[in-house]
Image (spheres, rainbow, N blue to C red):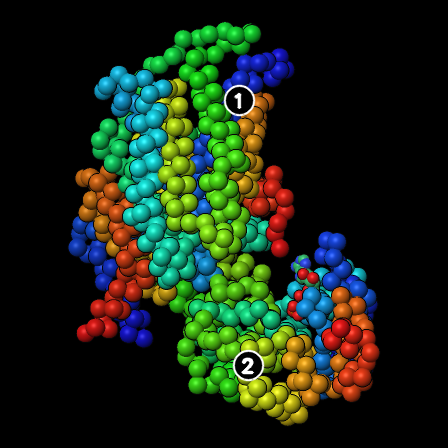
């Protein structure tokens, strides 16, 4: 019981919650605007992680700097994917008719390529580096600097994005696209531009998350998929395309997971996550935190 | 009719492969038949109704699990039938709530369900203190291959029969517009459930056979989501509009994997990924559509 | 006994009462008109009767049996079929395949191939789509798709067919032809129709009796003549 009430556990929950929120934020942005399920999202986290790892081991760049590099690399991939593949897919009526199936396969293809290109470049063995891993104790809670940094950066990016969406013109047009695609186009939103920028931003968010992960965990070319799944759980719980609720759901998942495991055992982690995922999809596919809008 | 004859000739030819005396070729035929059976079964639900399942590994895994639990106590044919039945019963049990969920939600729900079952089985197995189960007495590879060939044939005939039946007409109406289908008398819920069960049964038996082939059960592998992805990929690369689509897709990708996988697995995966992207963008009707085009031009 | 008996049906959508306490009876073999301004609740009434939307209160009986709560497919197989104001063709199937599904699964439950083929031909003939049978339904014009809605409903073998604004978008010649077709189907095959139409002239010519809805309430009921003279109807329609 003592451990359950400790600040230690709460801190751990918040760190993973903020990371989940950030990974899911990117996925949700892409789903919201493009209506496509990006099952390669976790692989962008992996790309971000390898960018940071590469920058650290080759040029001794600390993650606080390489995080920008990782974001840029992922945003560039977003640009390439959108311009190279999805504009073509969405513009072709026969392809667009079965856009769900088609985009799923496209993203699967992208995922497979990213994983194996990285595996061929860096080998498939796990990698890691040390950065800010000294333990600091603060108000009775011991933490490593890199975890604290993860919490701060991930939260800042999430809440910064939410503020941006609420208070800028671009944010408004993006939300318009998410909520009313056709109507948004009619009132003069440049759909193409919004989609391009959003997919870049969504991919960049994954890159940032990857950098954060690389500071605290071993990385492998195949580390991405669990992140994809967690991100899916989060945005399903929050409601697909519902950005704010997704961030909230990310933190909630961190709490549920950390405390759930503390109460049972780590062996139940996956069952917990997938159980939640399936239950939400069966009972409230529109999301736990969204107002019911099903007809 | 021409297709049927061609199909039977292929089956007969494949069944005679063990006479070449090279077990490698027998193994390749086993793989080919396995993927054809799986992709074709998948198409019974997903190509007809448009409900895209990304969780067919669960049926395969259940079949394998039931088979490994029964092996030793009953004859091997019975274990396969039990595996098929278990998969069908599982589909029937979860079908109603699952098939209420549509579009992209259905895709990820089936995936999530399959993973949930995988982790539950892994948990059960580790609670029982088992970290993989070996099977010591298995039928020879030829027998397994013939059984698999039988399943593939059954799946193709089944898929063909569905497409040409009243049932199939109802399913394609469901794919096009569920509400309108219901309005003109199609019992949508019942047909969807039937299609779901139909597409689960053969994968159950396939899982059992594949297990006997490797003679080793490990839940992480038996329920591997890569199986689900591969099935969808093969069916879509082959083309979902015809019965021969999934066959062509399974053949193309199995052969590609035989050529590249053992030597250059990572390169194989990159080629696979690129092939997929290329097909989706440039050959949307799959290999099957491509064949039509070439045949039409002549 | 009436073929269709709607008893005190109320439908509430959140705060909006789309139907309040509506009753009506339709006799076998009649053409029953349903009128009302936009949003009066006509389509909602169809949806309640055909089983697409459960009523908040009230019951529907068809052919002496209570059908409230039954699924649309059961109601269809019992012999009652509706069309959609906003058309819902099976876009990826051909026109003939669209109708064939209805013939296979509808009220007749026809299993014999020849009977199915005949039902398809008859229905296509009746609505004038016989020459377009092999094209994809998505390739039809809107007026073509409206005809397809009728053809599908007819092919189910339903005894009672409910048509929701199927003449919207047709030109006067086409409307005249359609009126003739419907009257003919009633006379020759003994079908019963409930028809919603904004083309008031058509409705007046065709209907035996007309019910007028306004904001979900029944405000008038009678023969076309009586409706034409009704003060409340005049007020709703002509201000
Ligand atoms: N599913 C629904 N949810 C909420 N409100 C609905 C729903 N369906 C209909 N309504 C409302 O119920 C009222 C009646 O609608 P209905 O479509 O039945 O009218 P109508 O008489 O068919 O009109 P029209 O002539 O425009 O077709 C309208 O105010 C409509 O907005
Ligand atoms: Mg209406």
Tag 1's secondary structure? helix
Q: State the residue at coordinates (19%, 47%).
A: B259
The answer to whether A48 is drawn above or below residue B182 in the figure is above
Depth check, front residue: B13 or C194 = C194
The answer to whether A233 is drawn above or below residue B96 in the figure is above
Task: Locate residue A219, reporting x and y percent.
Answer: 34, 25
Return the residue at label 1: A14
B24 relative to C179 in the view: left or right:
left
- The dot on residue C170 is 2
Quarter holding the C terminus of chain B is bottom left
Q: State the residue at coordinates (46%, 40%).
A: A170
Quarter holding the N terminus of chain B is bottom left
Depth check, front residue: C8 or C155 = C8
Q: State the residue at coordinates (41%, 77%).
A: C135
What chain is tagged by disc 2? C
For the residues labelled 1 and 2, the Cα–Cα distance comes to 63 Å
Q: State the residue at coordinates (53%, 10%).
A: A141
């Amino acid at each position: 019981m003592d451990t359950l009430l400790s600040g230690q556990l709460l801190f751990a929950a918040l760190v993973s919650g903020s990371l989940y929120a950030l990974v899911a934020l990117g996925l949700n942005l892409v789903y919201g605007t493009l209506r496509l399920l990006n099952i390669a999202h976790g692989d962008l986290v992996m790309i971000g992680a390898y960018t940071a790892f590469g920058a650290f081991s080759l040029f001794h760049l600390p993650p606080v700097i390489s995080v920008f590099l990782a974001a840029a690399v992922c945003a560039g991939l977003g640009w390439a994917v959108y311009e190279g593949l999805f504009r073509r897919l969405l513009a072709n009526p026969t392809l667009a008719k079965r856009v769900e199936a088609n985009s799923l396969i496209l993203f699967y293809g992208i995922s497979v390529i990213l994983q194996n290109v990285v595996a061929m470049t860096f080998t498939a063995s796990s990698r890691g580096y040390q950065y800010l891993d000294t333990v600091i104790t603060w108000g009775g809670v011991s933490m490593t600097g890199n975890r604290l940094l993860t919490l701060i950066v991930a939260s800042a990016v999430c809440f910064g994005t939410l503020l941006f969406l609420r208070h800028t013109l671009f944010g408004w047009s993006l939300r318009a696209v998410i909520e009313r695609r056709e109507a948004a186009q009619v009132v003069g939103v440049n759909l193409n531009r919004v989609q391009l920028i959003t997919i870049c931003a969504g991919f960049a968010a994954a890159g940032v998350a990857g950098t954060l992960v690389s500071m605290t965990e071993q990385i492998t070319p195949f580390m991405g998929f669990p992140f994809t799944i967690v991100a899916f759980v989060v945005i399903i719980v929050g409601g697909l395309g519902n950005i704010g609720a997704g961030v909230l759901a990310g933190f909630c998942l961190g709490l549920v997971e950390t405390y759930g495991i503390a109460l049972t055992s780590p062996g139940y982690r996956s069952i917990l996550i997938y159980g939640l995922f399936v239950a939400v999809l069966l009972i409230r596919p529109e999301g736990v935190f969204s107002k019911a809008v099903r007809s | 009719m021409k297709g049927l004859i061609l199909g039977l000739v292929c089956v007969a030819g494949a069944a005679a492969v063990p006479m070449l005396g090279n077990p490698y070729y027998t193994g390749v035929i086993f793989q080919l038949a396995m993927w054809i059976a799986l992709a074709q079964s998948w198409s019974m639900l997903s190509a007809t109704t448009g409900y895209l399942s990304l969780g067919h590994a669960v049926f395969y895994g259940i079949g394998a699990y039931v088979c490994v639990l029964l092996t030793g106590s009953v004859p091997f044919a019975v274990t396969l039938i039990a595996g098929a039945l278990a998969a069908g019963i599982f589909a029937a049990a979860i079908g109603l709530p699952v098939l209420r969920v549509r579009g992209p939600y259905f895709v990820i729900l089936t995936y999530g369900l399959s993973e949930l079952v995988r982790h539950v089985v892994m948990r059960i197995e580790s609670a029982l203190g088992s970290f993989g189960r070996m099977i010591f007495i298995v039928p020879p590879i030829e027998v397994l291959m013939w059984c698999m060939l039988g399943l593939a044939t059954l799946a193709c005939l089944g898929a063909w029969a569905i497409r040409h039946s009243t049932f199939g007409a109802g399913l394609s109406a469901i794919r096009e517009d569920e509400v309108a289908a219901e309005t003109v008398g199609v019992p949508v819920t019942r047909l969807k459930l039937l299609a779901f069960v139909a597409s689960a049964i053969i994968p159950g038996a396939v899982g059992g056979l594949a297990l006997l082939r490797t003679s080793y059960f490990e839940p992480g592998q038996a329920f591997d989501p890569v199986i689900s992805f591969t099935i969808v990929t093969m069916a879509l690369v082959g083309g979902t509009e015809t019965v021969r689509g999934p066959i062509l897709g399974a053949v193309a990708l199995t052969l590609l994997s035989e050529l590249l996988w053992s030597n250059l697995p990572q390169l194989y995966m990159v080629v696979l990924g690129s092939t997929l992207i290329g097909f989706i963008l440039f050959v949307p009707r799959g290999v099957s559509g491509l064949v039509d085009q070439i045949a039409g031009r002549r | 006994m009436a073929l269709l008996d709607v008893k005190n049906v109320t439908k509430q959508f959140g705060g909006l009462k789309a139907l309040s306490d509506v009753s009506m009876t339709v006799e076998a073999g009649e053409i029953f008109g349903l009128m009302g301004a936009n949003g009066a609740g006509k389509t909602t009434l169809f949806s309640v009767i055909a089983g697409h939307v459960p009523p908040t209160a009230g019951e529907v009986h068809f052919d002496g049996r209570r059908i409230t709560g039954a699924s649309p497919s059961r109601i269809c197989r019992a012999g009652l079929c509706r069309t959609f104001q906003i058309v819902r063709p099976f876009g990826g199937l051909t026109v003939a395949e669209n109708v064939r599904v209805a013939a296979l699964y509808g009220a007749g439950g026809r299993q014999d191939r020849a009977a199915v083929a005949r039902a398809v031909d008859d229905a296509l003939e009746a609505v004038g789509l016989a020459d377009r049978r092999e094209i994809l339904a998505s390739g039809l014009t809107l007026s073509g798709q409206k005809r397809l809605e009728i053809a599908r409903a007819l092919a189910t073998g339903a005894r009672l067919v409910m048509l929701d604004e199927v003449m919207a978008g047709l030109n006067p010649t086409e409307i005249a032809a359609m009126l003739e077709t419907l009257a003919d189907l009633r006379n020759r095959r003994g079908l019963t129709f409930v028809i919603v139409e904004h083309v008031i002239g058509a409705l007046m010519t065709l209907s035996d009796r007309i019910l007028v809805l306004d904001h979900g309430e029944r405000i008038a009921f009678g023969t076309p003549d009586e409706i034409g003279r009704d003060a409340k109807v005049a007020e709703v329609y002509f201000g």
